[in-house]
Image: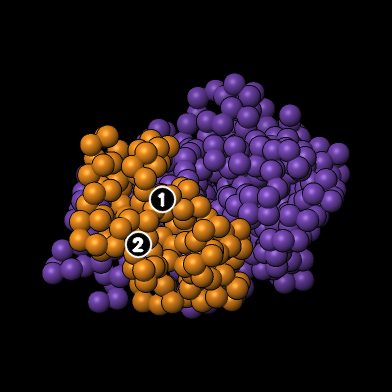
Chain colours: A purple, B orange
């Protein structure tokens, strides 16, 4: 189902024309209204008039999260505060948060994009959407909320946390769609199992829309099986707009980027060179309709690739692959790049293992060592040491052959790895501490 | 036949104390216990007076727990008493995965818990040799 077929299935030629017009307008807008962009363009020797086609985008300098921090709080806003109707901020792991502002029209655009997303994921005006993304400065909660209201669904603005109440309302209110992070979806499934609730029988939940952290197809299958739903991946980040930048269609082969509003590029994270479609690299976005805080070539640190092949769903917008990991979440061990998602892809093949895990990297006698902590689960457990050790060795061998380096696997007690109700922490790199 | 509780424990300080505290607070009595450990983790095996209560309290506290059938037998409390039982099982092709001793009856028998690969076979073999197999209720009587 489409929310806005004329936009979502726009003929490629027409789409390019629209994008070009919008890009040119955006560049003029930021050049005139944001001193930071004007200075950066002048330093690079690019004038607004030099940007005449989509290819000219590559002439412009990148913007990073650090640039947003350096201009804290409102330095990159392109309109006066009187035009801003909403402010969100993402918590910084260090120092100041990054702040974004929305005009009334930005809020409408965002709602439109989330309406496309939720409609594609199975919602309509009859849906009861339990929105377990956090409400507040985080964009997840309100982003989903406005899109759900726009399509006329009934929204339960429950926000994150309070698992017992989530389960109670899900049963009593007849929730048909759940929106939260994928790790929280699994956590909910576990909590239901503990309470003796069978989600495939005791609740009517049919759809889930999960994002805000990378997850594998294996994890998708586990969520779908445990909750008895269809699970859809969404992508977004507050610097670009929030959730709704890209969403998965029913074909489940990548996420359609809402290209009439955002231009994606894939670059080599080391050199900044633009990479051709199909190649993996860092995802970069330029917003072409945003008024409050447009971003030009914003480096997401998310690693993926783009595909422009026609999609069977009928949408013409470019697809990005599921995010592989973050260029800053990637760990390098003895010269080998390791992504938590690779480890996860092995763990989920052990259906009895909940994919709750942590990669712990240490430097022992000048040698980097990777240890993967995996939480014990009921079906993996045995009263016999030999059987438990057998499974541990099997996981170890599979990880070693996939990653190409030696790995230690440590089985830990259930729930001993920190669960966040937001983003799951997958890496503990102790090398930087010593 | 007796149902044994097995609990997964990390080899970190205080886990055993914590686990036994959970059982104590739930009012569960430990009748016997043994721990098998590796450098990585440990498996605690215990006979308790209330399996349901023990399972519920440990699961609520976040432990991985299961119940396993084991054989509780009395063997003559004299040199060679256990060897006779083990040899009998061995002859008939039943392998013992592990065993540990239970409370000691001060008179003539030692009580041993066996985990074997074929419980039914082991049971009939031992019974045919006059070895007494205890039931869960028999153990509760020894409290
Ligand atoms: Zn599609």
The answer to whether one can see residue B7 in this image is no
Q: Mark 1 near mark 2, Cβ–Cβ under 8 Å? A: yes
**SS for tag 2?**
strand
Badge 2: how crowded within 10 Å, few (<14), some, or many (20+)? some
Which image quarter holds the C terminus of chain A?
bottom left
Q: Camera-side residue: A382 or A19? A: A382
- Position in image of residue B96 (x %, y %): 29, 46
Return the residue at label 2: B109
- Position in image of residue A368 (x %, y %): 20, 62
Q: Is residue A396 left or right of residue B130?
A: left
- Position in image of residue A38 (x %, y %): 51, 63
- Picture layout, residue A22 above or below residue A333: above
Circles 1 and 2 on the same subunit: yes
Badge 1: how crowded within 10 Å, few (<14), some, or many (20+)? some
Return the residue at label 1: B132
Residue at the image point whose x is 73% and y is 54% from the top: A167
- Picture layout, residue B135 above or below residue B44: above
Please state the chain letter of the residue tagged with numbered disc 2 in the rendered image: B
Q: Camera-side residue: A434 or A248? A: A434
Q: Earlier in the sequence, mark 1 or mark 2?
A: 2
Spot the residue most to the left: A365
- Real-space CA distance between mark 1 and mark 2, rounded to the nearest whole angstrom: 10 Å
**SS for tag 1?**
loop
């Amino acid at each position: 189902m489409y929310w806005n077929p004329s936009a979502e299935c726009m003929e490629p030629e027409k789409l390019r024309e629209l994008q070009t017009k919008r890009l040119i307008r955006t560049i003029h807008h930021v050049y005139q209204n944001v001193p930071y962009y004007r200075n950066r363009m002048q330093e690079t020797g690019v004038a607004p008039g030099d940007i005449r086609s989509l290819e000219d985008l590559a002439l412009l300098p990148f913007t990073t999260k650090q640039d947003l921090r350096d201009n804290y709080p409102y330095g990159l806003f392109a309109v006066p505060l009187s035009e801003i109707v909403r402010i969100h901020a993402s918590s910084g792991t260090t120092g100041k948060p990054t702040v974004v502002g929305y005009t009334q029209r930005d809020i409408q655009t965002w709602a439109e994009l989330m309406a496309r997303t939720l409609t594609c994921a199975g919602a309509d005006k009859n849906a009861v959407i339990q929105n377990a993304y956090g409400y507040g400065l985080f964009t997840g909660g309100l982003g989903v909320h406005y899109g759900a209201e726009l399509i006329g669904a009934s929204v339960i603005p429950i926000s994150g946390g309070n698992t017992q109440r989530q389960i109670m309302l899900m049963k009593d209110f007849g929730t048909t769609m759940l929106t939260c992070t994928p790790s929280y979806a699994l956590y909910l499934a576990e909590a239901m199992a503990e309470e003796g609730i069978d989600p495939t029988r005791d609740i009517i939940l049919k759809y889930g829309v999960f994002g805000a952290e990378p997850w594998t197809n294996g994890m998708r299958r586990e969520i779908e099986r445990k909750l008895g739903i269809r699970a859809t991946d969404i992508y977004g980040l507050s610097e670009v707009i929030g959730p709704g930048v890209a969403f998965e269609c029913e074909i489940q082969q990548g996420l359609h980027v809402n290209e009439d509003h955002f231009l994606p590029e894939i670059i080599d994270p080391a050199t900044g060179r633009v990479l051709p479609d199909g190649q993996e690299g860092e995802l970069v976005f330029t917003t072409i309709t945003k008024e409050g805080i447009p971003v030009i070539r914003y480096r997401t640190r998310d690693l993926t690739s783009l595909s422009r092949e026609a999609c069977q769903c009928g949408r013409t917008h470019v697809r990005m692959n599921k995010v592989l990991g973050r260029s800053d979440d990637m760990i390098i061990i003895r010269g080998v790049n390791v992504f938590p998602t690779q480890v996860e892809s092995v763990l989920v093949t052990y259906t009895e293992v909940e994919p709750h895990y942590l990669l712990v990297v240490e430097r022992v006698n000048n040698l980097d060592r990777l240890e993967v902590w995996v939480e014990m689960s009921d079906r993996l457990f045995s009263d016999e040491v030999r059987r438990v050790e057998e499974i541990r060795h099997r996981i170890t061998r599979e990880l070693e052959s996939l990653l190409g380096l030696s790995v230690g696997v440590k089985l830990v007690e259930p729930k001993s790895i920190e669960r966040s109700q937001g983003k799951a922490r997958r890496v503990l790199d102790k090398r930087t501490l010593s | 036949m007796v149902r044994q509780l097995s609990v997964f424990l990390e080899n970190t300080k205080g886990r055993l104390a914590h686990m036994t505290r959970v059982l104590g607070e739930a009012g569960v009595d430990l009748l016997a216990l043994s721990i098998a450990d590796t450098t990585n983790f440990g498996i605690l095996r215990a006979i308790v007076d209330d399996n349901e209560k023990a399972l519920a309290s440990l699961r609520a506290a976040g432990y991985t727990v299961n119940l396993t059938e084991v054989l509780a037998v009395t063997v003559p409390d004299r040199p060679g008493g256990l060897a006779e039982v083990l040899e009998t099982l061995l002859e008939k092709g039943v392998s013992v995965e592990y065993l540990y001793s239970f409370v000691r009856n001060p008179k003539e028998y030692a009580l041993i818990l066996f985990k074997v690969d074929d419980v039914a076979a082991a049971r009939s073999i031992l019974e045919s040799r006059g070895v007494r197999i205890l039931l869960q209720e028999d153990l509760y009587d020894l409290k």
